[in-house]
Image (cartoon, rainbow, N blue to C red):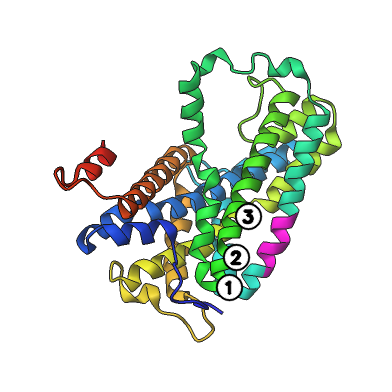
Amino acid sequence: MFLLHQSFVWHSIYTCISTIVPIYFQLLFSLPTPLKYSYVYQIQQRSWGDKVVEWLTVELHADKEWVYAYLQPGYGINPMAFLVSCSTTLLLLGGVKESKMITDIFTWIKVALVLFMAIGGLLLLDTNNLQPFMPPELNGWNGIMRGATTSFFGYLGYDGICCVAGEAINPTVNLPKAVMYTLIIVTALYVVAALALTGMQNYKEISVESGFPEAFASRGVMWAAQLTAAGEVITLPIVVLISGVLQPRLQYALARDGLLPHMFCEVTPAGNLRKGTIVAGTIMTFIATFVPFEYLDDFVSAGILVAFSITNSSLVIMRRESPENTPFNLEKLLLL
């Protein structure tokens, strides 16, 4: 049931912002928060659409002329992104309980798939592909930091946990554990999978659209390539579904504080944020269908980085004060 613990902290970033920022500026400083979930949602939709096209043409050897005519008609339109977005929105309108059951099933499938790719990649690892370990094109640590910034949205999951804290059982105990477990598991899987991928195939040859399937194919393990390609197509929509769950709950928090229209915090008798889900799903479906991937990717990572920076600054201000002889010195230093 939605709003199981209404008094509990709903959203980590927005809560920190609303604690230290005057009400008139809360919406301005909170904008990166809803935008990041919205654009992550859209990025995953378009990414899934591209993977479906590649899977059909490369793995299933479907007629390319037909696939491109209907699934990549041009002008930046992505019909498959429209399909997955509409499907997940309709599923969310059916209720949280149904969405949670599907989320649990596909999450375990996705974790199993990542473990398979990581372990399989390590078994096929060629140490020659790891030389040099820091490619000269990166320009040292500056390039590494730029790359980390680009992939920053990969760590959005732990913040998403806080968005559904109001529906958790015994959140004061379970929520901190969930956040820590998520950070540890995601970091471990990300590092091991990245090492396995770059060890299987030279970094200059790695496919941007279909990294692991192409890497397995380059090593001659075609069944693993086909399995991972199909797995990516089947499991990626779960990320879309989770992002769709989080966005209406953030809108609820903003509407509850008067920063959005009251309709966004209206809850149906069944416990769903029906109006917020419809509005968010409609807007995100439109953008995902018509806005190309390359315009969304960098914007999302930048928005998340700004949002987390605001959160960290908020926590410092909440716990420390400027010296009496230099008022607002702490705030000035954080701004710099």
Q: Looking at the image, which residue is at 83% across and 30% down?
A: 123
**Of circles 1 and 3, which is in front?**
1
Q: Quadrant of residue 6?
A: bottom left
Is 255 or 291 nearer to us in this picture? Answer: 255
Q: Which mark is residue 170?
A: 1
Amino acid under disc 1: Asn
Image spot of residue 266 (x, y percent): 40, 79
Whole-number angstrom distance, CA of label 1 to CA of label 3 = 29 Å
CB-based contact (under 8 Å), mark 2 and mark 1: yes
Q: Which residues are magenta?
A: 101-108
**Residue extending farthest left:** 325
Q: Quadrant of residue 96?
A: bottom right
Amino acid under disc 3: Pro
- In terms of secondary structure, where does tag 2 sit? helix
Q: Is residue 226 above or below residue 41?
A: above
CB-based contact (under 8 Å), mark 1 and mark 3: no
Amino acid under disc 2: Asn
Give the residue at mark 2. Answer: 174
- In terms of secondary structure, where does tag 3 sit? helix
Whole-number angstrom distance, CA of label 2 to CA of label 1 = 6 Å
Give the residue at mark 3. Answer: 237
Whole-number angstrom distance, CA of label 2 to CA of label 3 = 26 Å
Q: Is residue 5 above or below residue 182?
A: below
